[in-house]
Amino acid sequence: MWRLHLCLLVALAEPFLNSKKTYEYKYEGLVRVGRELPDLVESALKMRCTFKIIGESPQTFVLQISNVDVEDFNGLPGKGVFSPSQKLTKRLSAEFSQPIVFEFSKGQITDIRTAPGVSNTVVNIVRGILGFLQVTVKTTQSFYELVELGIHGVCQSSYTVEEDSNAKELIVSQMVDITNCQQPAALYRGMALAPEDKLSKQRGESVVSTVKHTYTVKSTADGGLITKAFAQERQYFTPFNVKGGNSRLRDIELLKVSDTTDKIVTGQMQSRGNLIYKTEKDLRPIPVVMINLNEPMPKILDLIKRLAQANIYHVDSASSTDILNLIQLLRVATLENLEQLWKQVSGNDEHRRWFLDLVVEVTDERILKFLETRFKAGDITANEAGQALVVAFNHLSAEPVSVALAQEFLTIPFSKSHPLMWNTVVLAYGSLVYRYCVYTDPCPITVVQPLLDMATSGLSKNSEEDMVLALKALGNAAHPSSIKTLLKFLPGYTAGAEKLPIRVQSAAVQSFRLLASRDPHSVQDIVLNLFVQRTLPAEIRMLACMVLLETKPSIALISVISEVLLEETDLQVASFSYSLLKGISKSRTPDNQHLSTACNIAIKILTPKLGHLSYRYSKNVHLDWFHDDFLFGTSADIYMLQNESLIPTKLMLKGKMHFIGRILQFLEFGFRADGLKELLVGKTPQLKKGITDFLSDWQNLPKDRPLLTAYARVFGQEAFLMDVREDSIQSIIKSFSPSAGKESKVWEKIQDVQKGTSWHWTKPHLVYEARFIQPTCLGLPVEISKYYSIINAITVKAEINPPPKEHLGELLSSDISLHTDGFVGVTKDHFVFHGINTELFQCGTELKSKIVSALPWAFDLKINRKEQKYEMNLTPIKTVTELFSVKYVFHDYYSTIVIRSFLIQNNSHDTKNSEVKFRQCADAKIYGTSVCIEAEAKRAHYLHEYPLYYFLGHTRFSYQLEPAEGAKPIEKIQIQVTAGRKNPPGVSEMMNLSHRVFKLYSLFIEKKKSSSEFDLDATPESVITVKALGLSPPAKPLGYEGVAFYLPTAQRDNIEMIVSDVGEEANWKMCANANTDKSQTSAKAHLRWGAECQTYDLSMRVSAACQPESKPSIYTKITWGALPSVFTMIEYVPGISYIMGFYQKYEKNPERQAAVTVVVSSSQTFDMRVKIPERTIYKKAIPSPIDLAGFEVHL
């Protein structure tokens, strides 16, 4: 709560300051950040001061502040006390001691001027102090509304006036609507790619703010006199719905005013603007860290060296948050500093990489000028340049000067030195244009003109590659002025466009995806016209329908789509469009709230005709969920576009997050396989002959057509585009060919490994930085910020012997030994901050989470390809090794440059609290290793109506490897693999047999059990033997041995596998066998395990019938004997079947047996009957995911 104590009476109808008087004020302010519940801690800041307003002229006044005193608080309200903050008091006193001049006329403050050294934080506090003077009083109206300029921007105020006739005073109340300001002072950063969802906001808000001023105005001879002023501002915030959790800023109070006659002389002054709050351009500091930013150069170098060293042999989770410190220091460095730093770190690979990965977070023109110098000097590799530029462009503050500098990269020759880097430059520039246009309306066409020219040039040259790249970049930019150019690539709009490659037309249609939200009506007209043209390729029409639905069309347009589909003859288009409508009809996310209703009506009309179409046709699969209390949800889509083939022409996968009233398309991946499809169609039999014969046709494909095109979108923006062409594949095949010699790149790598190579790579990355800064009536900014950073690291050491002498084929006939050790790991840090954040102090609530994943390894590998023997020796775990951990803490804190104090939610006797600790280990003593899970949670509250409070306190979970307690020391773990058959079956023979066995086991995943056996007619001969042993000399090895046998006969193919416990007294075994007849109409499998394979058993028999006089069917019988208690899934079959819509009837069926019959009832449906003990379960006309027309049953 801010309390403002003023020692003079001020103005009436227009607040009035007499230029011949001096006004003395006493000021006290208090701000609290907390949750307003008993026994939950709060952080707070209190400031007291006195100040004078001295008149210089009728419209010019001087503000002088003195006697500053600052105190801070971290604790339980009513049980703790404020503590003096001497450092902050001294810092503020020094700045407040300088005079401040402001212009005041007709109740409005028009200009504030200060000495050059006064910080922006102090000026904003002054704005809050002066804001109480700015009030409009109308004595003739009891209620009125005005649009006024204030510290929150140009916002609407609602006034009520009440008269106290006894005291001869007016009570004036002012409510300010700061959520819908015409010119808001609030600032959003990092959220341009997460558009607002207005329908989600109707279900609840994550931020709610209220501002109320109350004035007591008394009439005097000179005019109105404010005898008392009180201002209260509250902000409620939660990552979920506001009904769960809040933080609060409380009130301001004016006590009294007295006269003085002092005069003061001001020196050189500079204008700092009007009363509207001003935010620092570079938005420093980062709220979750607070460090001294003076003299950044040595601090930057020290941090780079420490972080590089700490993450060489593992991911150092303890120092992972230091990357935010480094980023903050880099942001205050000058361009000259960056150039000096580059000279000092560029000679060291580790330091160079850390610098390049994080200097891109300098989000203004400095990073562009720095990278431009690197591009022109050529002192970074194409790989380094591409990684740096894509992050720099996407994290850049989208200002006019930045966009202009970014355009220059499109003309630098180095940008085109590598195809992948050129794609990155063009796509990243398109993303920058998009973010620039979010905050610039109208958005000038000059920013997108280079991309328009690139598209036109590609069209004139008939360059498919150039056209696709330009169109994708235009799709990223989503500039309304690009529509005219995009139409040049669409059939039906431009003559000859239908002759363009389908890939180009497809890229043109998808370029409207982001435009769908910016200019939905224009996009609807265009893509609807494409969709209804039945002469167009199916892929173009399907994509047009997809884009059309992204415009959130009206029920009338959905009706048009339905009418077209009722008459549609192309089943690819019909199936895809129908599945799009069906997915949305079931959607529960707010953005589809109205559209899902319209689609639901359409589905009821279309289902009789299109509901039976199987997965051989193009489909969309949509899944989503949304929780109103948490205002959070996710959605996922899979798009499969096919064209008269089971091989998809195009495959897309995307996921979205719905949170706090915004939609973030987190990731999207896509593949286009025109060339690969052409290669595979009709060539499947070649797979049985060998990969070499199959690949021989690749060199016959057109050189300008890619086999495969892959792309990736991040936050809705296409960031990666790569074509895989025939020459690339041929180069890889040649490099790995047994005849490849010293000219091969693989040869060079093997030579390095033979010498004992070591390779290390790290990638620190700030994934996102999202900040919402809103001024308060106190002049202090309340901020909601989210940060997500990652450190990836991998270290590999390897040594191989002997190296080849002439060609790589020598490795196939030599005894090879390989030693390697290393690790791969990742640390993810996530921060959420809510509170006051200035360059002088921070006061707020913070949620910190850390996720750590790590996988170390160390092993020796011996390979004898000629004898088909392979051996791997692993070093057992000697110390506790954490493979995965999650921990987070939610606390209040107060921080200055010199001190940072935390207070985690403490528990008292009145608080609902909980503390849970859990640890469980699974021992593998044979291998001297234990797998352990640990969990710990401390909570202050578990209130169901407050979702935010589930997270109050501390939580930790870890998954780790440890040496097994009580186990004998293990020297090494040895895995041996031996191919025991001199003439193993051919690849195709084994593939076919494995495929049939897999189909046998996967017919019914319930795995209901049975019993039957068969005799082997041939002497078993092992195909492969695998041993996993724990070695501890001189003791005998312990572990497990598995042997697989393949026994073909004239009538059947047989496979048997035996797994046994290795040891003198061990008798545990598992025996499994399976066989299929050559006609592929029957198969059976038997599994036994326990002591000598005699304790437990189950078996399954499957037979198929496909006679001309009967319908195709599959009959499966599962029987079982003794089974462990874990195999009691049969009990859940009735309940699951009921949920799935099956009918049931009670009847006596054989015990320990289940029988399943599946009969094809039509080309699109099948019937199923399941018999289990005590009941029969059945259902008819079950929709089939595949087309059953002409279906023949083969196992």
Image: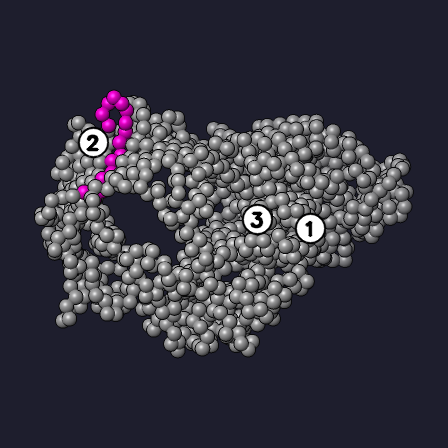
Please name the residue shown 46% across and 61% down the image: 706
1033 inside magenta stretch: yes
Q: Quadrant of the C terminus?
A: bottom left
Please name the residue shown 58% across and 69% down the image: 461
Q: Is residue 381 left or right of residue 967?
A: right
Q: Position of residue 842 (x, y in %)?
A: 64, 36
Q: Position of residue 140 (x, y in %)?
A: 77, 58
942 inside magenta stretch: no
Q: CA distance from mark 1 to mark 2?
A: 74 Å
Q: CA distance from mark 3 to mark 2?
A: 54 Å
User: Pointer 1 and pointer 3: residues touching (CB < 8 Å)?
Assistant: no
Q: Nearer the viewer, mark 1 or mark 2?
A: 2
For residue 185, which numbered disc appears in the image?
A: 1
Q: Quadrant of residue 305?
A: top right
Which residue carries the number 2 mark? Answer: 1062
Is label 2 in a helix, a strand or a loop? strand
Dot 3: within a 10 Å radius of its alpha carbon, few (fewer than 14), some, or many (20 or more) residues?
A: many
Q: Is residue 394 left or right of residue 317?
A: right
Magenta segment's dominant SS is strand
Q: Position of residue 41 (x, y in %)?
A: 55, 33
Please name the residue shown 13% across and 36% down the image: 1092
Residue type at numbered disc 2 = Val
For residue 701, which numbered disc appears in the image?
A: none
Q: Nearer the viewer, residue 1189 or 335?
A: 335
Q: Nearer the viewer, residue 790 or 837?
A: 790
Which residue carries the number 3 mark? Answer: 382
State the extent of the magenta-drawn residues as a range: 1022-1037
Earlier in the chain: of badge 3 and badge 2, it is 3
Camera sees residue 175:
no
Q: Position of residue 483 (x, y in %)?
A: 59, 69
Q: Nearer the viewer, residue 100 or 719?
A: 719
Residue type at numbered disc 3 = Ala
